[in-house]
Image: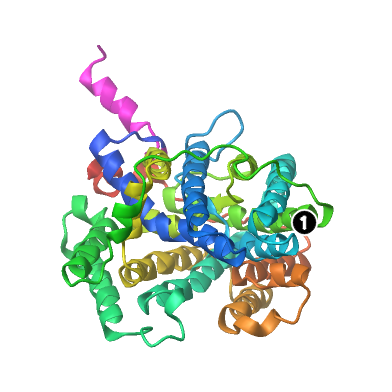
Amino acid sequence: MAPLAARRRNSASVHPVDEVLPLPKLSLYGFQHVLAFYAGAVLVPVLLGNSLGLPRHELVYLINADLVTAGIATVIQAWGFWRIGARLPLVQGATFTAVSPMIAIGQGAGGGTAGLLVVYGAVITAGVATFLLAPFAGRLAAYFPPIVTGTLLTVIGVTLIPVALQDVGGGAGLIGGPGYGDPVHLAYAGGTLAFILLVTRFGPPALRSVAVLLGLVGGTTVAWLCGDADLGAVDQAEWFGVSTPFHYGMPQFSLFPMLAMVVVMMITMVETTGDVYAMGEITGRHVDGETVGRALRADGVATVLGGVFNSFPYVAFAENIGLVRISRVTSRFVVVAAGLFMIALGLVPKAGAVVASVPHPVLGGAAVAMFGMVATVGIQILGRADLKEERNALILAVSLGAAMLPTVVGPFFERMPTEIRAVLGSGITLGSLSAVLLNLFFHRRADRGSGEEIDWDALTEADTPAGR
């Protein structure tokens, strides 16, 4: 057995991203990621299933398939093997960018399960294309200086905050109804957010790292005691269910849907690139073109799996990037644990129904902090860019304005052709494209700059997961 001093030196040489925490902490922190991820995870299958007119039992099947595939994708991205996976604490989820194109493709093919088969053919094709393009996209890392990556993350956070605020009001399904914005909803959201802030301010380090989880559990408990949390779906859900490959039949490969989905995945590659650099900023792990390439290969593999296992295209979830920033738990194995929890929830629909019982206002209160943290990371990166330089200032200003267009003025692109609306109808997509293209326009030679990186070796013990 090695001497104690030698073992301590070996432990000190492990980057916080690669630190394997004790099983209780892995489980607790991992489950917190699942709660932060869950609402966004089920939203994509709910939107697509309802738009294609699927019956309720098929909608439940899509949700379970999404959870299982997202769990597998998360393990691939965080654990990594060969040259696949960024080996960073990135949680993978179905991308919102693909929702509008998938709805258009499915409805154009007649809706129902027939529409799903055409969607899955396009998803598989897009996944293969993403995997093949990953090495070339990784070489484009030099074209993402701090002004671009900072703008990307700021845009993602700012455009996601309205989604959280919709939940604060009672959920998107209540918008326009008499119950939307009910003071009770605002009280649940405000109480959840206040609880998270109080724990973060006054709690010991062990509690601060799970402040979001405690807020969600506490808010749901209060809502249940007041009769505002519905647990009826738990009784109706099955104990066990497995998503089988090609459940609805063999995918149909149609040229224009495939091309449309490839374009969508090329756009999400920009988003993934920004997410990888943001996570590198948060964790102090050096990120280069090879890291980006591995992350994009993982996106490609996960998207192919999505088409095979009746699911969707996958990218890193910005919600969980904010959670890593808040909790300061940077171990990628915590995210691996979260992936395993997702797989378990997907195989046990009754367990997933328990998580789904978190009321929208409670989730919205927590999401305000998490999405705001994503924007904060972007602002932190922007601090490395010279915003006194007029060109950089214009890149940020125009990109933020472009991102707000579909976010604030929803019907703006409704008269556009479906293919154009699928690209321009997302604030994240429009803002990201603006930042990348304007940077190419203003700066002929990209330069990531010499921004000072986080020196994780200099972190104090209290700043690392081991210190908690």
Snapshot quadrant of residue 250:
top right
Q: Dot 1 corresponds to which residue?
A: 257
> Which quadrant of the figure contains the C terminus?
top left
* Magenta-drawn stretch contains 14: yes
Q: Residue at x 24, y 68 (%)?
A: 197
Tell me how the rendering is colored. Answer: rainbow
Magenta stretch, main secondary structure class: helix
> Of all residues shown, which one is farthest toward the top?
1
> Which quadrant of the figure contains the N terminus?
top left
Tell me where the magenta segment starts and ends, as one range.
1-17
Snapshot quadrant of residue 300:
top right
Which amino acid, mark 1? Pro
Residue 372 at x, y = what percent?
42, 69
Q: Is residue 96 left or right of residue 137?
A: left
- Tell which of 400 and 394 is nearer to you: 400
> Does residue 6 appear in the picture of this structure?
yes
Residue 2 at x, y = what percent?
26, 14
203 is higher (above) or lower (below) than 168: above
Q: Residues within 10 Å of mark 1 (few under 14, many from 20)?
A: many
